[in-house]
Amino acid sequence: MSIAQNKKAFFDYFIEEKYEAGIVLE
């Protein structure tokens, strides 16, 4: 896996985690 792919995967994971956390907080 290239660094670019790794960064994108991490970013997507981060966004998903924040999105789910936002739903839980609401």
Image (cartoon, rainbow, N blue to C red):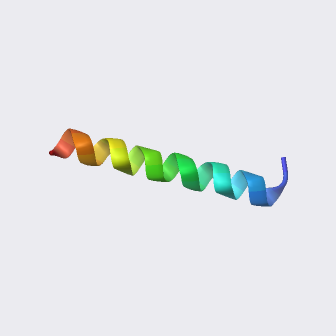
Q: Is residue 23 left or right of residue 10?
A: left
The residue at the point 36 percent across, 48 percent down is 19
The residue at the point 57 percent across, 56 percent down is 11
Q: How many labels does the image show?
A: 0
Q: In this view, does 20 lie to the left or right of 1?
A: left
Q: In this view, does 14 lie to the left or right of 10?
A: left
Quadrant in which the C terminus is drawn: top left
Instruction: Tell me residue 15's x, y (percent).
Output: 46, 53
Residue 8 versus residue 23 in the image, above or below: below
Residue lying furthest right: 2
Residue lying furthest left: 26
Instruction: Tell me residue 1's x, y (percent).
Output: 84, 46
The residue at the point 42 percent across, 45 percent down is 17
**Where, by quadrant of the figure, is residue 3 drawn?**
bottom right
